[in-house]
Image: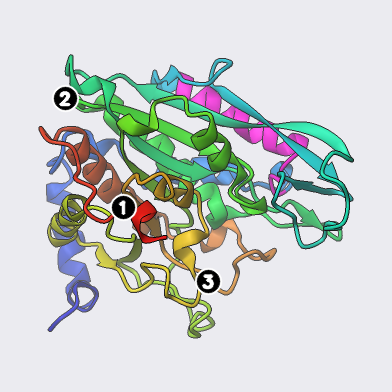
Amino acid sequence: MFRKEAITIIFFPILSFLSIFSSGQESVPGTGVIDSGDLESHVSFLASPYMGGRSNGAPELEIALNYLVSQASQTGLKPAGDSGYYQSYKVIRLNNAIRWPYYTLKQADKNIDEKEGEEIVLRNVAAWIEGSDPLLKSEYVVFSCHADHIGRINGEIYPGADDNSSGCAALLEIAEAFQNSSEKPLRSIVFLWLTGEEIGLLGSKAYVNNPLFPLEKTVADLNIDMIGRVKEVADSTSDTPVTGPYGVFVISDEQSKDLMQIAEKADKRSIIDFDYSLSGRNNHLNLFARSDHFNFVKNDIPVLFFTTGLHSDYHTTNDIISKIDFNKMELITKCIFEIGMEIANRKQGLRVDNPYSKRQ
């Protein structure tokens, strides 16, 4: 059976030629707003040396968050935080590390009392679009990503262009697509730029512990983390799985057959090839539990996690802007937007056939 990757590589000149004439046609209204140039502009700001790697507790991360708030406001998104666009939560800084009660960084002393150390505040960015249906607008489709990275180590900046400036940029473009679509979502749409992900999924944990919108009314979470890379020669081991020029890993635990059917439909109509091989809890990389969607999973909310994989530059100084494939990013972002729009406009919600809580 042919894979879409093979077909698109063989006929790439034809597809490029056809795309010139089809660019004005949108499978879902608003899709055409999502643009590789805009994605590149956002990533270039967030992963610039001036952002210092956006580590938790660093002033550069606050600058990045302010940028996201500014963009969300310009797009016309409503603030959804407990203070404008921000949702605050507290952590403890110990030995130059940040941790949450019951979670300890490797470099932190596990024997230190949790109450010792400096208490600091981290912030998520939250925005939303109110749904257009009088009844369904009280249900919510969440788009999430994390804005933090690992900062500086021994004086060297870890830019985090793919991890996760790419996801932050995608959410900004998806938000703009919703705002410019002639087809308004029936359900409300929530956008979360989370922090604390690199130190234990803390921002998403803070959100589900103190949700800005009821979890029982949250229909799905579409999480985006690292969607900008294409497989290179170094990405050939089982520990560095990366998709090809037209691929994206879609990770789930099949909590909802309805959601999986929506994903499969999007896969069939898109040039992007969905790869489910890293799904579930049995894969040795355990990516299913390593990004912010997992805290939604634990609350029995159906999720899809989109990533192009753990390339050899993951958490290194080489995760830089010049290695991002922005054309691929645009295609993936459009797919995620279309999936979100379909979820938002379903007459029926998503059935949770296989809840995580029942499998513990």
Q: Earlier in the sequence, mark 2 or mark 1?
A: 2
- Under mark 1, the amino acid is Pro
Q: Is residue 227 above or below residue 2?
A: above
Does the image show residue 120?
yes
Residue 181: image tag = none
Q: Identify the magenta region.
A: 53-73
Which label sits in the foreground, 1 or 3?
Answer: 1
State the SS at label 2.
loop
State the SS at label 1.
loop
Residue 326, position as x, y percentages in the image: 41, 54
Q: Residue at x 18, y 25 (%)?
A: 186
Q: Is residue 175 above or below residue 169?
A: above
Colour option used: rainbow
Q: Which residue is mark 2?
A: 182
Q: Is residue 239 above or below residue 33?
A: below
Q: Which residue is mark 1?
A: 355
Q: Earlier in the sequence, mark 2 or mark 3?
A: 2
Seen from the viewer's position, the closer of residues 354 and 288 is 354
Q: Which residue is mark 3?
A: 311
Q: Magenta span: helix, strand or loop, mainly?
A: helix
Residue 145, position as x, y percentages in the image: 48, 44
Asked whether 56 falls inside the magenta stretch, the response is yes
Which label sits in the foreground, 2 or 1?
Answer: 1
State the SS at label 3.
loop
Quadrant location, the C terminus: bottom left
Whole-angstrom CA distance, mark 2 to mark 1, is 35 Å
